[in-house]
Image: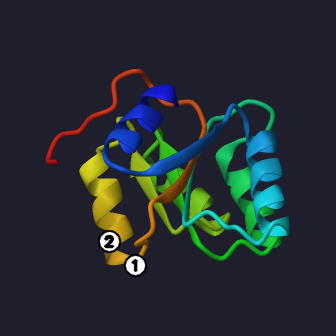
Amino acid sequence: RKLLRRLLERRGHQCEEAENGLVAIELVEQALAEASCYDSILLDYEMPIMDGPAACRRIRTMGYHYCIVGITGNVLPDDVAHFKRAGANCVLPKPLQLCALERFWKENGVISMNVTSFGHYPDRMSEQGS
């Protein structure tokens, strides 16, 4: 999580992070109440207290309509489909390749750099292809 944040910030993105799914929901709830929304949210599939798909589902029911990217080491079709049914716009594999994430953002019109990253990511993020 911390490494991903550093990599994104080096590329000019503004980030906040949460150590678990419940904290992620609280941050989004606070942002929605203040009318300052995140342009994109990154959720790890496996997070303490509440996993990524459950947090994604709750965030969608709160009225968040922007981009949610699921990140998982479990790229089995059923796991990806489960994350998408929960409301993720896309699901990317670990280790996360920043070029794939930024390509998705570009293709989907995420033009601002205000990004929130929630979850536990391995210490080896890949910047291949960037």
Q: Residue 103, position in %: x, y?
A: 28, 64
**Residue on which the image places disc 1:** 109
Mark 2: few/some/many CA within 10 Å (<14, 14-19, 20+): few
- Of residue 108 and residue 38, the one placed in the foreground of this image is 38
Q: Which label is found at residue 97?
A: none
**Residue displayed at 36% across by 50% down:** 12
Could you tell me how far apart the alpha carbons at marks 1 and 2 are, in whole angstroms? Answer: 5 Å
Q: Quadrant of residue 104?
A: bottom left
Residue 10, visible in the rendered structure: yes
Point out residue 54 in the picture as x, y percentages from the top left corner: 75, 52
Label 1: how many Cα within 10 Å (few below 14, some 14–19, many 20+): few
* Residue reaching furthest to the top: 123
Q: In the structure shown, which secondary structural element does the residue marked by tag 2 occupy?
A: helix
Give the amino acid type for the residue marked by disc 2 in the picture.
Lys
- Colour approach in the figure: rainbow
3 relative to 98 in the view: left or right: right
Q: CB of mark 1 within 8 Å of CB of mark 2?
A: yes
- Please name the amino acid that badge 1 sits on: Gly
Identify the secondary structure beneath mark 1: loop
Q: Which mark is residue 106?
A: 2
Q: Is residue 42 above or below residue 106?
A: above
Pick the residue in front: 28 or 12: 12
- Whether residue 44 is visible to the viewer of this picture, yes or no, is no
Residue at 64 percent of width and 68 percent of height = 87
**Quick one: 111 or 49, which is closer to the camera?**
111
Q: How many marks?
A: 2
Location of residue 30 with respect to 34 vertically, above or below: above
Q: Residue at x 44, y 25 (%)?
A: 122
